[in-house]
Image (spheres, rainbow, N blue to C red):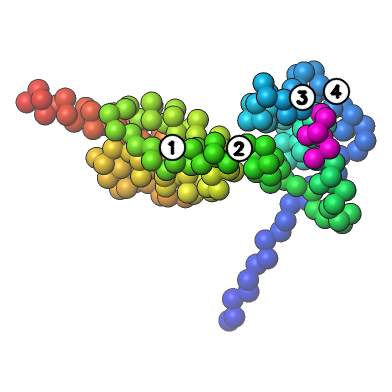
């Protein structure tokens, strides 16, 4: 019998009604979201992080998150977005949050800063730090993942590669590389504790 390939069924996303969008906008505005006009004192990264926090809280990151975020743009930054919209075909698919994030940061974060982030990310190693300390610094750098061009899998691999050798070796016995980054940190902390207890037992003997 010839095996039949099952075509995965794509989830149907129901478009929000005008009333629903209005209610979401009112809820979004209750958080007093930041605006961004590109002034020297403003942080493009901070603006996006705050917007994402509010969007995640209200549960609209992937549905209308880009629309609400671009609504907060002002001055020349809004004109930049407006130029993009006018230049896009009417039938083009709307940007996802990650696509918008990448485009925005590449436009408004200096190349020199992006390069510094990449070098720091690629060279980060645990060294004498605890796993929790290493994970904190790593997570801070992961905020720039769209600029760094790293996927979730690449970030997990990079995190594991930077761990202390004994922890990395012990983790390889039980870790599947496709698990989530947060799970990887948990496994690393557990392995670190296990190795510390083993060292204490040896010292007692």
* Marks 1 and 2 close (CB-CB < 8 Å): no
Looking at the image, do the residues carrying marks 2 and 3 touch, with CB atoms under 8 Å apart?
A: no
Q: Secondary structure at mark 2?
A: loop
Say which of marks 4 and 3 sits in front: 3
Left-right relation of 17 to 112: right
In this figure, which residue is indicated by the disc labeled 1?
Answer: 120
Residue at image x 82%, y 55%? Answer: 92
Q: Earlier in the sequence, mark 1 or mark 4?
A: 4
The answer to which quarter of the image holds residue 55 is top right
- The residue lying furthest to the left in this view is 205
Give the extent of the magenta segment: 74-80
Q: Is residue 146 above or below residue 57?
A: below
**Element marked by disc 1:** helix
Left or right: residue 184 versus residue 130 is right
Instruction: In the displayed orientation, state which residue is furthest to the bottom.
Output: 1
Quarter in which the C terminus is drawn: top left
Between 109 and 103, the one nearer to me in the picture = 109
Q: Mark 2 or 3 closer to N-term?
A: 3
Question: Which residue appears at 78% of the width and 34% of the height?
Answer: 77
- Pointer 1 or 2: first along the chain: 2
> Quarter of the image containing the N terminus?
bottom right
Which residue is identified by label 2?
110
Looking at the image, is mark 2 or mark 3 nearer the viewer?
Answer: 2
Q: Which residue is mark 4?
A: 26
Q: Position of residue 104 (x, y in %)?
A: 69, 40
Where is mark 3, residue-wise?
35
């Amino acid at each position: 019998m010839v095996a039949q390939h099952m075509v995965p069924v794509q989830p149907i996303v129901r478009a929000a009604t005008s009333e629903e969008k209005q209610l979401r906008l009112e809820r979004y505005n209750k958080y007093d979201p930041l605006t961004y006009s590109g002034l020297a004192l403003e942080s493009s990264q901070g603006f996006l992080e705050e917007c994402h926090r509010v969007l995640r809280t209200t549960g609209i990151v992937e549905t209308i998150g880009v629309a609400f975020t671009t609504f907060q743009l002002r001055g020349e930054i809004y004109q930049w977005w407006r130029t993009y919209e006018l230049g896009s075909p009417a039938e083009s698919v709307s940007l996802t949050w990650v696509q918008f994030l990448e485009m925005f940061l590449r436009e408004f974060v200096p190349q020199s800063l992006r390069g510094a982030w990449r070098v720091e990310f690629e060279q980060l190693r645990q060294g004498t730090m605890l796993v929790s300390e290493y994970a904190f610094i790593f997570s801070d750098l992961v905020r720039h993942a769209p600029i760094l061009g790293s996927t979730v899998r690449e970030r997990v691999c990079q995190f594991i590669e930077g761990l202390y050798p004994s922890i990395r070796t012990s983790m390889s016995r039980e870790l599947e590389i496709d698990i989530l980054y947060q799970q990887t940190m948990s496994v690393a902390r557990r392995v670190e504790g296990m190795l510390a207890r083993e060292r204490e037992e040896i010292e007692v003997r």
